[in-house]
Structure formats: structure tokens, C-alpha cells
Amino acid sequence: MTALIDSLREGVPKALVELQRLGRTLTKRAADILAFFDRPGTSNGPSEAINGRLEHLRGSALGFRNLTDYIARSLLETGGLRPLLHSRLG
């Protein structure tokens, strides 16, 4: 991959503007691109799952004007109140 990035950076005719632009972009982002090949099997799935959950939480607590009510709704939605509720049952 390093050889490909180098060839796009240096060996492209001036008429191929798009390939020159691609070569500049790949050169700037070379560390990120090469890291992908150094760590096979990695994924951004877990961070996307957290982002999705936060968006769902934000949507479920819309309309609350009081910060205390917003926090209570957020804790209720995420299960954060569960230890407090179950400790009183036992």
C-alpha cells in the first residue's frame, strides 16, 4: 500500500488531475490508511453502537425543560436507576 501511495504521489501525469488529487489525499492520510492494514479485524462498530444509543436516549428525553427530570428520564431509560429501585425491594 505504501508503494501505491508513493506512485500516486509522484508518478502521475499532469493531465490526470483527479489521480494527483487522490495521491495528495492518500499521502496526507497515509498513517490512517496504513493503520487499517496493520490491525486486521478491527471495526468502528462498537463506537457506532454507542452513538446510536446516545441518539436514542436524546430522543426519548426530548421535551424536558427541567434538568433533574431530564437526568431522571435518562437514567430510567438506560437502567441507571435499577440498582436503586432493586435495593429497596430486598
Image (cartoon, grey):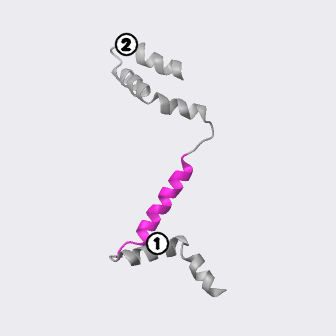
Quarter-wise, where is residue 85 in the image? bottom right
Q: Main secondary structure of the magenta part?
A: helix
Residue at position x 54%, y 46% in the image: 44
> Mark 2 against mark 1, which lies toward the viewer?
1
Residue position marked by numbered label 1 in the rendering:
74
Q: Position of residue 56 (x, y in %)?
A: 46, 65
Residue at position x 37%, y 12% in the image: 13
Image quadrant in which the N terminus is located: top right
Front in this rendered view, residue 36 or 88: 88
Q: Does 90 appear above or below 79?
A: below
| Residue type beneath disc 1 | Ser
Front in this rendered view, residue 53 or 12: 53
Magenta span: 44-64
Q: Position of residue 55 (x, y in %)?
A: 44, 62
Q: Residue furthest right?
A: 90
Image quadrant in which the C terminus is located: bottom right
**Membership of 52 in magenta stretch:** yes
Q: Position of residue 48 (x, y in %)?
A: 51, 53
Front in this rendered view, residue 81 or 48: 81
Mark nearer the N terminus (2 vs 1) = 2
Q: Secondary structure at mark 1?
A: helix
**Membership of 7 in magenta stretch:** no
Q: Position of residue 18 (x, y in %)?
A: 36, 24
Q: Secondary structure at mark 2?
A: loop
Quarter-wise, where is residue 68 in the image? bottom left
Q: Does 15 appear above or below 89?
A: above
* Proximity of marks 2 and 1: CB atoms separated by less than 8 Å: no
**Horizontal side, residue 18 vs residue 56: left or right:** left
Residue position marked by numbered label 2 in the rendering:
13
Front in this rendered view, residue 75 or 87: 87
| Residue type beneath disc 2 | Pro
